């Protein structure tokens, strides 16, 4: 674990920071989150402007709510930008203090710099919550006007999580796959009949085709944010609520069904060998 070792050190509760890597990871994660959220916010502005132009005449209350939410989201991003700058400066100061060790403890002396890092992290979390909550409330307000507001990254994340869990099932049949490869190798080098070798070869090609299809789907889902953005033109978009789903949405649903079926077929095939 990275840190500084000394006979004398401060004991301080600094959850979630337990060492330098966890602090650096937090700074990098916050930087990435801020980058993507600012990109979302900018993509949302023209959609919001169009909606406000309609609602200021027809649904003034919704107009006011959207305006207030937008201001809070903008302020949240500004606060995170400032807090992140502070976090970077304090991290540099911390790294310049040899003899200070990260210790997760509720007792002992408290170091002001570490306490400030934790407090700053809490402010970042609060501002992130304000921004994310604002997106959800905007989605609900758009829905009242029969519009579907989609933040692609939020939409795609549960898809990616589901496919990640499904991909783990492939490891359950790994031993069977290894055994089949062993059998295939034996068929090639041993004096088996040509018909047997042909059947094994045909089965191998079919299994490889199915495995390749699983790999392609997993890769597409991993890159779905970029694929969807390329199709619709931005990371945020709106459509009439009754409009057909986008091509990437339909394709994911269809390919997911096929993925599950293929996974089951592979499992049954290897279990029967």
Image (tube, helix red, strand yellow):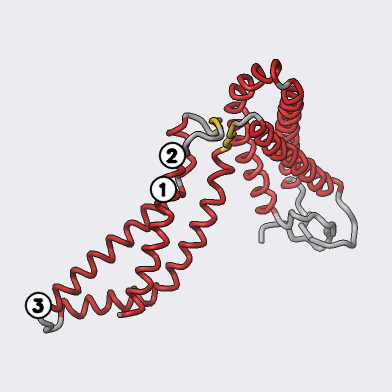
Residue tagged 2: 227
Q: Earlier in the sequence, mark 3 or mark 2?
A: 3
- The residues bearing labels 2 and 1 have C-alpha atoms spaced at a distance of 8 Å
Q: Residues within 10 Å of mark 3 (few under 14, many from 20)?
A: few
Q: Is residue 26 above or below residue 2?
A: above
Element marked by disc 2 = helix
**177 left or right of 76?**
left
Toward which corner of the image does residue 11 lie, by quadrant? bottom right
Q: Position of residue 231 (x, y in %)?
A: 43, 33
Find disc 1 in the rendering and name its residue.
220
User: On the image, numbered disc 3 is attached to which residue?
Assistant: 194
Residue closest to the eye, 104 or 158: 158
Give the quarter of the figure containing the N terminus. bottom right
Q: Residue at x 65, y 16 (%)?
A: 53
Disc with the residue nearer the chain's start (2 vs 1): 1
Pick the residue in front: 109 or 179: 179
Q: Secondary structure at mark 3?
A: helix
Rendered residue at 28%/66% (across/down): 207
Judge left or right: residue 73 versus residue 105: left
Distance (Cα) linking label 3 and label 2: 45 Å
* Residue 106 point in image, percent of width and height: 87, 61
State if disc 2 and disc 3 touch (CB < 8 Å).
no
Which residue is rendered at x = 72% and y = 44% of the image?
91
Q: For residue 96, what is the image quadrant?
A: top right
Q: Residue furthest bottom?
A: 191
| Circle 2 residues within 10 Å: few <14, some 14–19, many ≥20 | some
Q: Are marks 2 and 1 in contact (CB under 8 Å)?
A: yes
From the top left corner, tell me how far across and down residue 49 is, in percent: 63, 20
Picture quadrant where residue 86 is located: top right
Q: Secondary structure at mark 1?
A: helix
């Amino acid at each position: 674990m990275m840190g500084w070792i000394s006979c004398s050190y401060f004991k301080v509760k600094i959850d979630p920071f337990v060492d330098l890597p966890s602090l650096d990871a937090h700074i990098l994660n916050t930087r990435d989150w801020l980058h993507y959220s600012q990109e979302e916010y900018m993509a949302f502005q023209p959609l919001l402007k169009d909606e406000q132009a309609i609602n200021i005449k027809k649904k003034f209350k919704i107009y006011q709510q959207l305006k207030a939410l937008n201001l809070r989201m903008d302020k949240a991003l500004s606060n995170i930008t400032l807090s992140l700058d502070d976090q970077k400066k304090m991290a540099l100061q911390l790294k310049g203090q040899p003899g200070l060790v990260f210790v997760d403890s509720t007792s002992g002396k408290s170091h002001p710099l570490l306490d400030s890092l934790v407090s700053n992290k809490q402010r970042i979390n609060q501002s992130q919550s304000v921004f994310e909550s604002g997106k959800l409330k905007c989605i609900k307000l758009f829905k009242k006007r029969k519009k579907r507001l989609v933040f692609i990254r939020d939409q795609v994340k549960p898809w990616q999580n589901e496919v990640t869990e499904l991909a783990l099932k492939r490891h359950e049949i790994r031993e069977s796959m290894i055994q089949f490869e062993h059998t295939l190798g034996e068929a090639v080098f041993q004096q088996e009949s040509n018909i047997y070798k042909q059947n094994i070869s045909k089965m191998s090609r079919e299994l490889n085709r199915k495995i390749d299809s699983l790999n392609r789907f997993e890769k597409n889902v991993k890159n779905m944010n970029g694929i969807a953005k390329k199709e619709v033109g931005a990371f945020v978009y709106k459509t009439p609520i009754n409009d057909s789903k986008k091509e990437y949405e339909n394709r994911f649903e269809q390919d997911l069904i096929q993925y599950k079926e293929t996974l089951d077929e592979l499992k049954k095939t290897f279990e029967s060998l």
